Amino acid sequence: MTSQPFLEAVKNRRSIYGISKEAVISDDKIVEIVQEAVKHTPSSFNSQSTRVVVLLGENHNKLWDLTTGTLRKIVPADQFESTEQKMNAFKAGYGTVLFFEDKDVVDGLMQSFPSYAQNFPIWSQHTSGMHQFVIWTALEAEGLGATLQHYNPLIDEEVKAAWSIPDSWQMVAQMPFGKPTAEPGEKDFKPLEERVKVYK
Ligand SMILES: Cc1cc2nc3c(=O)[nH]c(=O)nc-3n(C[C@H](O)[C@H](O)[C@H](O)COP(=O)(O)O)c2cc1C
C-alpha cells in the first residue's frame, strides 16, 4: 500500500450532519471496524486506555432521547427548538459510537511512572482523539457519514446507568453516524506555508 489511498480517505472524512437510518454496511462490519480500530490505534505507553461503546437500533435512539431530555432541563425554552432539531438530526442516524477513557488505567500509569505523571491525562485524551479519527475515517470510507459531538459531562450519569458503564470509564465524545443525506459544508483552509515549515 502507498500513502495515497490512506490520504484519500483522510481527505474524504468530513463532518456530515445529515444522516439517515438506511443501512450502508452490516452491523457486523461496523463492529469489525470499531474492533480493528481499537486494537491497532496507538496509545501512550501502549496503555490501551480507550473504551468504546457502539449503540445501534433502539440503543442509538435512546441515547439521543436521553440527551434531548437532559438539554431540555438546561437550555432556555426559547432556544430549545433549534437544540431539539439538532438532537433529532443525530437520532435520525443509524448508530452512535461512544468514546471513553479508563481512568483506572491512567491512574495506574501515573503511579507507575511518577516522573511523567502530569502527562498521562493529556496523553489519554490524545489517545482518544486518535481512536476517534480512525473510526470516523473508516466509517466514511465505507460510505457512512459521521460527526463528533460532546454532550459529556451533561449526559455521563444517565449513559452510565443506561448501559451499565463501569465507573472508571470517563466519556470523551459521541460520534453519531448514518447514511449521508446532505453534503458537508464549505471548508476553509489556512495557507499551508503558515502551518508547515520544512528545513532541508
Ligand atoms: C477535537 C474536535 C472536537 C470537535 N467537537 C465538535 C463538536 O462538539 N460538535 C461538532 O458538531 N463538531 C465538532 N468537531 C468537528 C469540527 O468542527 C470539524 O471537524 C471541523 O470544522 C472541520 O470540518 P470537517 O470535519 O468537515 O473536516 C470537532 C472536531 C474535533 C477535531
Image (cartoon, rainbow, N blue to C red):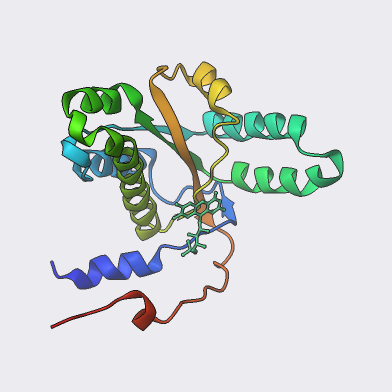
Front in this rendered view, residue 100 or 124:
124
Q: Position of residue 2 (x, y in %)?
A: 14, 70
**Which residue: 36% across, 75% down?**
195
Front in this rendered view, residue 82 or 26:
82
Front in this rendered view, residue 85 or 149:
149
Locate residue 108: give its quadrant.
top left
Say above or below: 75 vs 155. below
Q: Position of residue 111 (x, y in %)?
A: 22, 22
Q: Position of residue 151 (x, y in %)?
A: 58, 38
Say above or below: 147 vs 153. below
In the image, taking residue 34 as reference, residue 186 lies left or right, namely right
Locate residue 87: give its quadrant.
top right
Position of the C terminus, as image quadrant, is bottom left
Front in this rendered view, residue 184 or 74:
74
**Which residue: 55% across, 31% down?**
153
Position of the N terminus, as image quadrant, is bottom left
Q: Position of residue 41 (x, y in %)?
A: 23, 45
